[in-house]
Amino acid sequence: MEKILIVGNGGREDALGWHLSKSNEVSKVIRISQKENFNSVEELIIREKIGLTIIGSEGQLSSGIVDFLNSKGIHNVFGPTQKMALVESDKFYSYDLMRELSIPQARSIKCSTKFEVFDAVKKFEQPVLKYRGLAGGKGVKVYSSQKEAWSDLENFVKNFGTEILVAERLHGKEFSVFGIADGRNVLPFEAAFQDYKRLGDGDAGPNTGGMGSYGPVQFISKELIYEITDGIIAPVVRKTNYKGFIYAGMIMSNDGVKVIEFNSRLGDPETQPTVMLIKNNLYDSIKSSLEGNVQKSLVKFKKGSSCCVVLASRGYPENYEVGLPISGISEAEKIKGIKIFHAGTKFENNSWMTDGGRVLGVTSYSCDGISIARKLAYEAVLKINVPGGFHYRKDISLIV
Ligand code: AMP
Ligand code: GLY
């Protein structure tokens, strides 16, 4: 039996921890904030005799936590090194890598000065501006016209500087594909997932960390997932000796599937429906990946669908109040097939309180498909409340 440490305390890590704790090989799962410094993570690993450490979020990965722990002689750490994590943390790097490997992506121009940015915007009818570094999902702006981009340019440059990738806007359905890589090979998750980044119904409003998700995405076949794994993800893994979870954000554009971005971790909130659907435990796949032998294991999915609706604090993603008492979580979990994952909560005076922008991921499973899974999730949503109510989308899994 082994103790697992998960670094990260969002909904994704709650879901992963819940899933891994069901493995017969796992005695305990400890989760800590992604804000912990490297030394205290090391101390905890030694003190608690942790057998496996999983890094959940891109911030710690791109700051080099895996390199740090390895340098201290701690090797059972699952996640890419700082250099491997560049695939997510540096959009110039991933653009160049995809070009080198002939991986289909949007036409883009790397810019370093204001003049270059302004010049590049003229080249695309519908420009997309992408800040080069990590920005928690907020560093990308997609415009419907040049005019719209022009009126926002100064503001974007003021916020993010001039290291910007200017891209053409692609149109089509987006979906996420995940895998586990061992430095050479990739084990695909055989279902694709979709997340809902915009705040409001009908994809209106600003981008958020994610307001919901569902899977499997009906329009993506297993064959296509294998094609994406072999033709797009595996070349990146081999070129960079990548280890850890890998996530390809894809779009089904008019001229075929293209990559929108690579991420060096699992998706949030896509992990929540993923763990409701996985048949065998990811623990075995993670361990075989650390041994450099990921192909020995499988990530199998159950028949059926899962839907996750995020309950957010009113005012998110801007200003919001925290510390409000949450009612109804246990009633909601009494509904068969429902699991509530915690993203921004704290337990105080015998009660759950809000403690973040995205608070809970109400997640369902139904063996009868997505419409039943959706119905269950929204039934559970109605049981949970805070004073003033939560904000949530009512169309998760309805629009694709
Ligand atoms: P990224 O951080 O690169 O994943 O971008 C965040 C979101 O912006 C994506 O999930 C897309 O919805 C959107 N996006 C990024 N690049 C493009 C593009 N070239 N065309 C259309 N939408 C895009
Ligand atoms: N679901 C989007 C992300 O995790 O980046």
Image: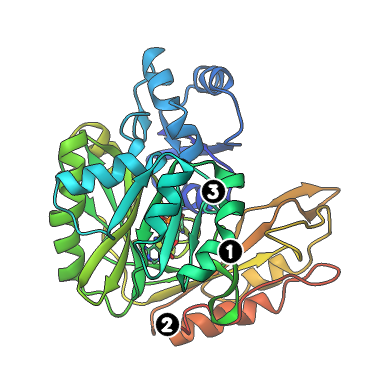
* Residue highlighted by disc 2: 370
Q: Nearer the viewer, mark 3 or mark 1?
A: 1
- Residue 324 locus on image (x, y percent): 84, 58
Name the N-terminal-most of marks 3 and 2. 3
Residue depicted at 22% across the width and 42% down the height? 97
Pointer 1 local density, CA inside 10 Å: few below 14, some 14–19, many at least 20:
few
* Residue highlighted by disc 1: 151
The label number, if any, that marks residue 81 in the structure image:
none
Q: Is residue 297 above or below residue 372?
A: above
- Residue 60 locus on image (x, y percent): 49, 33
Residue farthest toward the top in the current orientation of the protein? 72
- Gap in Å between the C-alphas at discs 3 and 1? 23 Å
Residue depicted at 41% across the width and 12% down the height? 72
- Residue 288 locus on image (x, y percent): 23, 38
Colour option used: rainbow
Residue depicted at 28% across the width and 47% down the height? 95
- Residue 286 locus on image (x, y percent): 31, 41
Specify the amino acid type for callout 3. Answer: Gly
- Gap in Å between the C-alphas at discs 1 and 2? 41 Å
Q: Give the secondary structure at mark 2.
A: helix
Quadrant in which residue 100 is drawn: top left
Q: Is 269 situated left or right of 394 in this image?
A: left
The quarter of the image that holds ligand 1 is bottom left
Name the residue nearer the viewer: 65 or 318: 318
Name the residue nearer the viewer: 287 or 161: 161
* Residue highlighted by disc 3: 136
Quadrant in which residue 352 is drawn: bottom right
Q: Is residue 334 above or below residue 32?
A: below
Q: Is 61 situated left or right of 37 in this image?
A: left
